[in-house]
């Protein structure tokens, strides 16, 4: 199946990477590496992929991922990020971001219409986590929390008021962070860009959907356009490389480029289009998605048609041969988002005409 069709890709590699415990972290080539263990980060993303799919086996796999998250959650409400065979859960790679990702995934599961056990697990985890995510301070973990709380406002009536108040506080903090750090040639939330950068404007677009605050919308649009201006400068997407990241005043490192960053842009652009109806964001999303099929610095596709997986990144020496969990989940999430955007464009063209403008 060609990548550019925006139809659902198959789930061969996701299945290959998943066993009875959950989704494994790494692979050697396309072969899963059980010694790498399982992370909350990957199983949270995998839960979202399963929930958003029309895959006939999605209930079985969604339950595996939700049960993993349930086992990984501590009594305080946060999550232990890494399960190693023979050692159990270890806290070596715990992070605020993994807590935020797990909270976001569970927020989508609380109203899932596919299985009662799944809903109960996610509701229990969300309730335990609410007191913990209030204290997350890193911008990306705040962004995951903001999206999660926005989901709960609509999907978990028993906690809608508490979720809205937390979303309002986090949304204001993230918006203020942008305006404190923004300068003429650096329209961003921090003094550097690292990974999953687009999750920050993405979260603000989501928040605008439950509280129509023009300051928040301006921050979301300006920061996403800043990413577009910088990362599409060559006519195709160059995500920020992980060899040093991009520090204000410095050069954007070109390698290694990772699939999660292209996915982050696709998701942010989808949300931006849904909120504003502006074609510029739809076009940005298209270009970000085409990174996977070869419109990138190496002109090499990352989607592996033979395995159904996605290569782990672009390096100065070519494709990373490995096809781990994060990469294939990023591709599948991006694919789902693009399919949704195309459907929204068809609907909007009927509602608002060819100029594609929305009254804000």
Image (cartoon, rainbow, N blue to C red):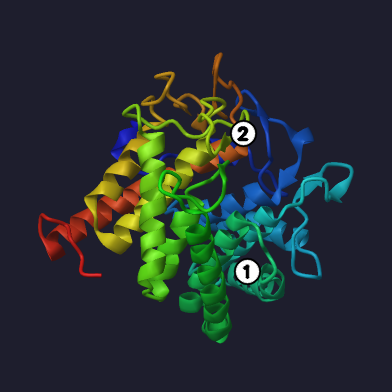
Single out the residue that lies furthest toward the top: 317
Nearer to me, 284 or 333:
284
Q: Which residue is drawn at 31% across and 40% down?
A: 286
Residue 266: image quadrant is: top left
- Tell me if mark 2 has few (under 14), some (14-19) or many (20+) residues whose alpha carbon lies within 10 angstroms of its own: many
Residue 340 lies, in percent from the top left, at: 33, 53
Residue 288 lies, in percent from the top left, at: 38, 38
Q: Mark 2 points at which residue?
A: 324
Q: Determine whether, in the image, residue 19 is placed left or right of residue 279.
A: right
Q: Which residue is drawn at 57% across and 43% down?
A: 192
Query: Measured along the vertical axis of the image, is residue 117 above or below residue 300?
Result: below
Q: Determine whether, in the image, residue 158 is placed left or right of residue 285.
A: right
Nearer to me, 148 or 64:
148
Query: Measured along the vertical axis of the image, is residue 85 above or below residue 113?
Result: above
Q: How far, Cα to Cα, is label 2 from label 1?
A: 25 Å
Query: Measured along the vertical axis of the image, is residue 319 above or below residue 146?
Result: above
Nearer to me, 352 or 14:
352
Residue 290: image quadrant is: top left
Q: Quadrant of the N terminus?
A: top left
Residue 26 seen: yes
Q: How many marks?
A: 2
Question: Residue 122 got which mark?
Answer: 1
Q: Determine whether, in the image, residue 244 is placed left or right of residue 176.
A: right
Single out the residue that lies furthest toward the front: 184
Q: Residue at x 47, y 53 (%)?
A: 182
């Amino acid at each position: 199946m060609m990548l550019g069709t925006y139809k659902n890709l198959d789930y061969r590699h996701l299945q290959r990477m998943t066993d009875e415990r959950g989704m494994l972290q790494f692979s050697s080539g396309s072969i899963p590496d059980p010694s790498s263990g399982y992370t909350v980060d990957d199983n949270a993303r995998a839960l979202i992929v399963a929930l958003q799919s029309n895959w006939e086996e999605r209930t079985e796999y969604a339950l595996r991922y939700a049960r993993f998250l349930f086992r990984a959650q501590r009594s305080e409400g946060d999550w232990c990020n890494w399960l190693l065979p023979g050692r159990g859960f270890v806290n070596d790679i715990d992070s605020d971001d993994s807590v935020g990702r797990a909270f976001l995934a569970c927020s989508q599961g609380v109203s899932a219409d596919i299985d009662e056990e799944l809903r109960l697990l996610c509701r229990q985890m969300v309730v335990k986590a609410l007191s913990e995510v209030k204290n997350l301070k890193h911008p990306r973990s705040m962004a995951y929390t903001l999206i999660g709380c926005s989901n709960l406002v609509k999907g978990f009536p028993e906690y809608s008021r508490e979720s809205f108040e937390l979303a309002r506080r986090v949304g204001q903090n993230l918006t203020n962070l942008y305006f404190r750090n923004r300068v003429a040639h650096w329209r961003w939330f921090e003094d550097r860009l690292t990974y999953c950068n687009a999750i920050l404007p993405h979260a603000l677009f989501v928040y605008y959907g439950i509280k129509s605050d023009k300051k928040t919308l301006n921050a979301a649009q300006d920061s996403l356009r800043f990413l577009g201006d910088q990362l599409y400068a060559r006519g195709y997407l160059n995500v920020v490389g992980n060899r040093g990241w991009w520090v204000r005043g410095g050069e954007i490192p070109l390698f290694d480029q990772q699939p999660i960053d292209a996915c982050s842009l696709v998701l942010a652009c989808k949300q931006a289009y849904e909120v504003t109806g502006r074609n510029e964001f739809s076009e940005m999303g298209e270009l970000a998605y085409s990174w996977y099929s070869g419109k990138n610095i190496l002109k090499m596709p990352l989607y592996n048609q033979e395995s159904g997986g996605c290569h782990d990144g672009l390096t100065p020496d070519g494709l990373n041969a490995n096809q781990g969990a994060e990469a294939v989940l990023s591709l599948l999430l991006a694919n789902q988002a693009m399919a949704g955007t195309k459907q929204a464009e068809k609907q909007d063209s009927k509602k608002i005409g060819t100029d594609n403008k929305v009254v804000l």
